[in-house]
Amino acid sequence: MNVMLFGAPGAGKGTQAKFLIEKYDIPQIATGDILRAAIVDNTDMGLEAKKFMDAGQLVPDSTIIGIIKDRLAQEDCKEGFILDGFPRTLAQAEALKELMVTMKISLDKVISLNVPDELIVGRITGRRVCSKCGASFHVEFNPSKEENVCDYCSSELIIRKDDNADTVKSRLEAYHTQTTPLIDFYTKMGLFIELDGTKDVSEVTKDMIKQLS
């Protein structure tokens, strides 16, 4: 089962990926995570990416694709994977398609979680993250038992610097500009499925599993 989760930042991709991991026993491939892992592991692609990051530059698509290629070649991806957060542009989508042809693998579904921008702003600005263990909470939807204190390690909960309304709105604008063309790209491939991401988390999961069955 090779799945791509599609949607704006804060649409719930990470939350739903956890359920897919449990049900299908396949790994989540989030671009940021594998980029950091490649750098920590000092892989060839990781070292290349680090050069750009140290220079304050964006990591080019060719390097990101190289890192994804290395990740997809690992043993735990043999039975499937969940792509989360990539591709973000049409050029990346085309490069990913070429990579998969080369690797003789293909996507089964591209599942989009549709959530209005105003709801996403509320979701992200209400997020609180543990300063020590990284656990995530939300002041409305998933509050900690004690205000601003992590349920798991009792450390302080913080607001990430990019979890403010202005930054979120800017990220959403960039998402709509860069990523919306991918809807047509994957629709033409017969892979694109849109789900209502405003439903209760468990309902979204049920809808997703139904589409994958």
Image (cartoon, rainbow, N blue to C red):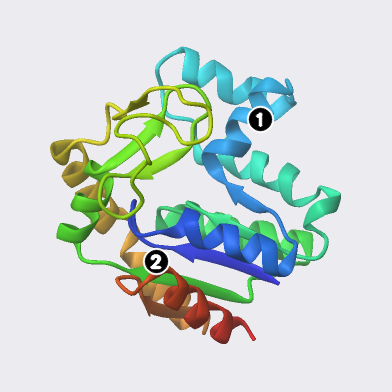
Under circle 2, the secondary element is: helix
Residue under pointer 1: 37
Compare residues 143 and 86 and report the one nearer the observer. 143
Q: What residue lies at 72% left-to-right and 45% top-to-bottom?
A: 71
Q: What residue lies at 33% left-to-right and 74% top-to-bottom?
A: 199
Q: Is residue 78 left or right of residue 168?
A: right
- The x, y position of residue 55, in whole percent, is 44, 13
Q: Is residue 1 left or right of residue 204?
A: right
**Residue 68, which numbered label?**
none
Q: What residue lies at 68% left-to-right and 29% top-to-bottom?
A: 38
- The x, y position of residue 26, in whole percent, is 73, 60
Q: Amino acid at mark 1?
A: Ala
Under circle 1, the secondary element is: helix
Circle 1 Cα neighbour tier, 10 Å, few/some/many (<14 / 14–19 / ≥20): some
Compare residues 162 and 47 and report the one nearer the observer. 162
Q: Quadrant of the N terminus?
A: bottom right
- The x, y position of residue 105, in whole percent, is 74, 67
**Residue 182, which numbered label?**
2
* Rendered position, 167 above or below 195: above
* Rendered position, 111 above or below 14: below
Q: Amino acid at mark 2?
A: Leu
* Rendered position, 96 above or below 131: below
Q: What residue lies at 65% left-to-right and 45% top-to-bottom?
A: 68
| Quadrant in the rendering for residue 137 | top left
